[in-house]
Image (cartoon, rainbow, N blue to C red):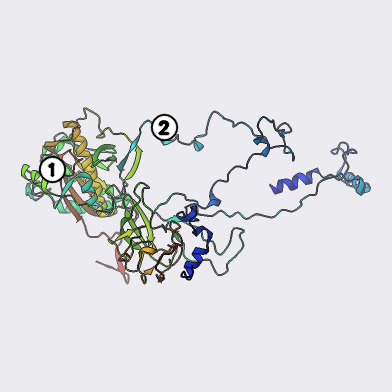
Amino acid sequence: MALRVVTRALGSLSLTPRIAAVPGPSLLPAAQVTNNVLLQLPSASMLLPSRPLLTSVALSAKFVSWKSRTKYTTMPVKMRKSGGRNHTGRIQVHGIGGGHKQRYRMIDFLRFRPEQESKPGPFEEKVIVVRYDPCRSADIALVAGGNRKRWIIATENMKAGDTILNSDHIGRMAVAAREGDAHPLGALPVGTLINNVESEPGRGAQYIRAAGAGDVHSHSGPSLQR
Amino acid sequence: MALASGPARRVLARPWGLGLEGCGVPRRGAYEWGVRSTRKPEPPPLDRVYEIPGLEPITFAGKMHFMPGLARPVFPPWDPGWTHPKFRRLPPLQEHPLYKDEVCYIFHQRCRLLEGVKQALWLTKTKLIEGLPEKVLSLADNPRNHIENQDERVLNVISHARLWHSTEDIPKRETYCPVIVDSLIQLCKSQILKHPSLARRICAQKNMLSTTWKRESTLIQVHGSSGAQLNAKDPLPPIASREEVEATKNHVLETFSPISPTISLQECHIYDVNDDTGFREGYPYPCPHTLYLLESANLRAHRFQPDQLRAKMILFAFGNALAQARLLYGNDPKVLEQPVVVQSVGTDGRVFQFLVLQLNTTDLASEEGIKNLVWVDSDQLLYQHFWCLPVIKKKVVVV
């Protein structure tokens, strides 16, 4: 679009004023036309009033993110590596790039996501397989519950055939936490090792997701933080 | 306030934490798939002039080019009257004549059941028995039924399919798997002179089967074509006696909570409930005899696991049996006096799975009652391995 502006602006330029147009340019040989032009040097007052012109245009980066899929699927999805480049195409972070080609497996970080809105309570899921994920340091587990399957971050001793509980209920007594279960922080006893923590309920896990990471649940008592 | 410490104090100091509307709802929801930059950009908003009612905005429509200061004209959408087939969109699902509100779980030939045979048994209300029934095994052991030079001929069949059949050095599974199955069926057909009743059978391919049944308030449908199908003029005799059939009443089907039994099936709102055996009325060979399911994909990831293949065999054999039973005895769910028997063979060119299914009842909605029976003989190797090229060590062929 910018190019079109430039060409249109340049097209409105002419070396001779419009009133005194050169008649029949095809009849005159080219050399004579240029001589005529050189003799009639236009002064500043004869120049047509024109808008300020843009004679150069910046090339915009053709960056389209590969994250175009809107529906969740357990099949691995092709991805494009960034190489440390940002949307302008320039390197923003050095040292990134290369490595084996990877396919992205869509991980569901919101553990408590009931399959249907009509059944809102805590629910159980079964671990089908725990496998390596090339996109992160942690392993991932395929869990199935109801009619759907999804990938989640696998904890250390998770294996195929385990049953895990996803709950949003906080009772008066602290829950006897098993490995792999998901509870609100208010329901867990102080001192449990936790990972995949979300800062607010419904946000999705953003903290403590890497392999080997695990934090001790430190504060108890009434607090608005979940 | 003085008792709160550390993070709690910071939390209480935040304005949204003090019981405002945003308390239960997160400030930002969980990640939604699809980056905003890849979504279609919304159209630019109309000029403010159009918000004034009764005023006709002056636009540059007549000038045929943009003019700053004049409003952007809004043209009526143009209907070309025709769409190129490349850009045609399907009408919304609700307008399809076969759309139904009740969801149906369809099993087709690419469905890999997560729980395998257990899930197939629950869906078809069937009891599993390991090993083929004695009636069938006695047929195989009877020396009168053996083909002359049986071993040599089968070895020839394997060599033909795996090596001699095509011009490539190492034929791919897509080539040799159907060739093996066809050659073995041809071997069996060569016994027509000894057993003339074999002539009352015919091999059919690419027939579309479709049956629907209700299993504990969920509608399940089997739809699709299984590989080759052997049809006969006479139905197979029932294998299990009445006592064994009555004994299945006490059998309890395995459940696998928290997984729902309809996992891995395709949920669909557009389906046809009518049964279809794949053949028209008056077909001279009406009774389904044996189904042959081939797993002939080249890549191991595209082939079904043996467990998933057995589940697919059970479901397709059951679909055929149910369609035949409904054709003979009507659509009412009831216990059949004459059980319908269908056999099935599944293979990937080397490992064979055999299956005999006896349909005792079409009453599948309830959990109790008489169950159907299935005998499964799994993972039978026809041959251990087959090397197409000779092994050469130090320029000498190793035998």
Per the image, the residue denoted by label 1 is: B370
Visible in this render: residue A207?
Answer: yes
Per the image, the residue denoted by label 2 is: B95
Amino acid type of the residue that numbered disc 2 sits on in the rendered structure: Glu
What chain does badge 1 belong to?
A: B
Residue B44 image point, x, y percent: 62, 42
Residue located at (23% from left, 40% from top):
B319
Mark 2 element type: helix
In the image, B48 versus B333, the foreground residue is B48
Residue B19 image point, x, y percent: 48, 56
In the image, A106 versus B178, the foreground residue is A106
How crowded is the residue under tag 1: few (<14 C-alpha within 10 Å), some, or many (20+)? many
The alpha-carbon separation of the residues under discs 1 and 2 comes to 41 Å
In this rendering, position of residue A135 left or right of residue B305: right
Q: Are marks 1 and 2 in contact (CB under 8 Å)?
A: no
The mark that comes first in sequence, 1 or 2, is 2
User: In this rendering, is residue B374 above or below A143?
Assistant: above
In this rendering, position of residue B29 left or right of residue B382: right
In the image, B157 versus A206, the foreground residue is A206
Residue located at (71% from left, 48% from top):
A3
Residue B354 image point, x, y percent: 18, 49
User: In this rendering, is residue B375 above or below B65?
Assistant: below
Instruction: Tell me the tag on residue B305.
Output: none
User: In this rendering, is residue A74 above or below B42?
Assistant: below
Classify residue B67 by image quadrant: top right
Residue B133 image point, x, y percent: 10, 49
